[in-house]
Amino acid sequence: MFAELGVTKQRFEFKFNPKLQLKLTPVPLTLKKSPRTNAKLGIVDSILNKPSFKMNLENELLNHLSWLDGRDDEMLSLVEGLCNQNSGTYNLQGIEAVRQRLLAEFGPLGGNQHDVPVALQETVNDQGSVVQTPLGPAIHLSKRPDAGHQVILCIHMDTVYGLDHPFQKCRRIDEHHLNGPGVIDAKGGLVVMLYALRCFEASPLAQNLGWQVFINPDEEIGSPGTGDYIEKIASTAELALLFEPSLPSGELVSWRKGTGSFSFVVYGRAAHSGREFAKGRNAIAALSRLMVAIDELNRDPEVTYNVGRISGGGPLNIVPDLAIGRVNIRVRTLAQQALVEQELQQLVDDFNSRWDGIKIETHGHFTSPPKIVCDETERLMKRIEACGNLLGESIKWQGSGGASDGNKFSAAGLPNIDSLGPEGGEIHSSNEFLFIPSLIRKARLVALILLSLAKK
Ligand SMILES: [Zn+2]
C-alpha cells in the first residue's frame, strides 16, 4: 500500500554486510495499510484490550527478558560510539556515518528496508528570501507486515550539536552517569529501541507482531524533511513507541504542547535619512510595533509567544526597507492553535492595511500540533503502567511544553507514547547526561511491552 501512499514504488530486502555496504534487493510490495483506518477504535481495542493484554502479564513473559541479562556494558559502549560520532542535523556526513552504523546494528534483525524521500528544509534567511537546505537520509525498516498487529518504533539520529559546537565527546562522570552529546537525546533511546527489539525477536512470541523502525535525521529542527512521511506511515500501524528521554524527574510524558515557528518579513521603503526622511517607510519601526503586539498576546500561560530573533537595517543614514522578526509559539489544544492562527492573521492584515508603504509577509506554520491524550493513548498508558508494575517500577506521567515526533503521529491519528528512552537530564546543553542504569531498565520495559502486545 506504500505505492498508493506515494512513499516508494519498490521495497528492498536488507541484508547485513560486515563491510557496511548495503545490498538492496527489490522484493514484492506487501506492506499494507492497517485496518485501523477503517475501524479505528475497534482495532486498537483489539490490541490494547485483548484478554491476555488486560493483566495477564504473568511471569512467562518475564522469562523472555533474560536475553537482556548482562548486556549493560555493550549497550553503554554502543551509546558512547554513537555519541562520539557527531550527527548535528546539518552535518550530513555525520548523519550518514551514524546511519550506516545503525543499519549494521539493526540489519541482523531481518526485515525489509524502504527508501525514504527526505524533503528539503525551507527557511527564510536574513534577506527575507526563502532558502532550501538539504537534510540527511532516514532509515525505515519493516518486519512481518502481514502479522495481525503492527507497531511503529521511532526516534531521531540527529542532535542539536553541530560540528562547530565544543561538545563532541563522551565523558564518564561516575559509575552511574555519562556526559556526552546526545546520550539521552536521543542516542541512548536508539540503543534502548535496538536492544528491546533484539530481546523481543529472540522470543517465539515475536511471530505475532509486525514492526517498523523509523529513524529520522531532522527531528531537532522539527522534522521538516520527514514530517510528511511520518504522516503516511502512521496509517500502517495501530500504535507507536518513541524513544525520547523521560523527564528529568523520571516521569514519562503524557501530553505535549504543539509548536509553530513563524517569520514575519517586513518590507518598507528606503530613503536618505537626512534629505528625504519623509519619503521613507521604516521597516524596523513597523516590525518593532508588530513584535510588541505579538508579545502582548501572552495572556494565557498555556499559550506562549516567544519573540526569539529580529534582524534588519544597515547604514544608519538609510531608512531601512527590510526587517525580519521570528517568533516561536506553543499551545495546549487545537482550539488554541486555531485561535493563534486567526489572531496572527488579523494582526498582520491590520498592519498591512494601516500603513501605506509597509508590507508584511508571514512564513511558517504549526509544524507540530498539540499531542492530546485520547482514550486509546490512555489505554496504552495503562498497559505500560502494568508492564512497569510487573518489573517493580511505578510509572508516573507528566505533560511537557516540548514537542516531539509523537505530536505528528498523534495528529495523524496514531496513539503513541514518546518518552521510552533512558533517564538523564540537561538536554540541549554541554551538561547533557545519561543515568546509565536506566538503559537496560528501559530496554526491559519496552521488550515487555512488545511481548505483551504479541501475546495471544
Ligand atoms: Zn532534542
Image: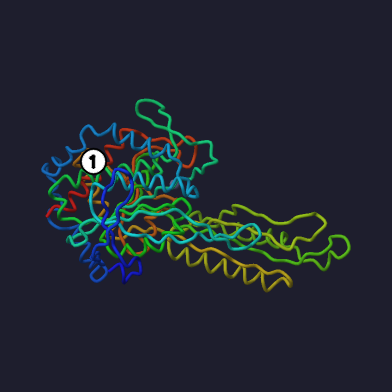
How many badges with numbers are in the image? 1
From the viewer's perspective, tell me whether residue 88 is left or right of residue 111: right
Indicate the position of residue 304 as horizontal and vertical percent values: 52, 55
Residue drawn at x 52%, y 64% as measured from the top left: 340
Return the residue at label 1. Answer: 444
Indicate the position of residue 357 as horizontal and vertical percent values: 74, 71
Q: Residue furthest right?
A: 275
SS label for mark 1: helix
**Which quadrant of the rendered structure holds the C terminus?**
bottom left
For the residue carrying disc 1, how many other residues have a C-alpha within 10 Å: few (<14), some (14-19), or many (20+)?
A: many
* Residue 379 visible within the image: no
* Residue 222 visible within the image: yes
Q: Tell me: residue 200, above or below residue 327.
A: above
Judging from the image, the colouring scheme is: rainbow
Q: Residue furthest top?
A: 174
Residue drawn at x 50%, y 54% as measured from the top left: 301
Question: Quadrant of the rendered structure where residue 19 is?
Answer: top left
Q: Tell me: residue 73, above or below residue 87.
A: above
The residue lying toward the viewer, choosing from 297 and 79, is: 79
Indicate the position of residue 263 as horizontal and vertical percent values: 59, 60
Residue drawn at x 33%, y 52% as measured from the top left: 154
**Which quadrant of the rendered structure holds the N terminus?**
bottom left
Q: Amino acid at mark 1?
A: Arg
Indicate the position of residue 406 as horizontal and vertical percent values: 37, 55
The residue lying toward the viewer, choosing from 215 and 436, is: 215
From the viewer's perspective, tell me whether residue 172 is left or right of residue 238: right
From the viewer's perspective, tell me whether residue 2 is left or right of residue 271: left
Disc 1 beta carbon < 8 A from ligand 1? Answer: no
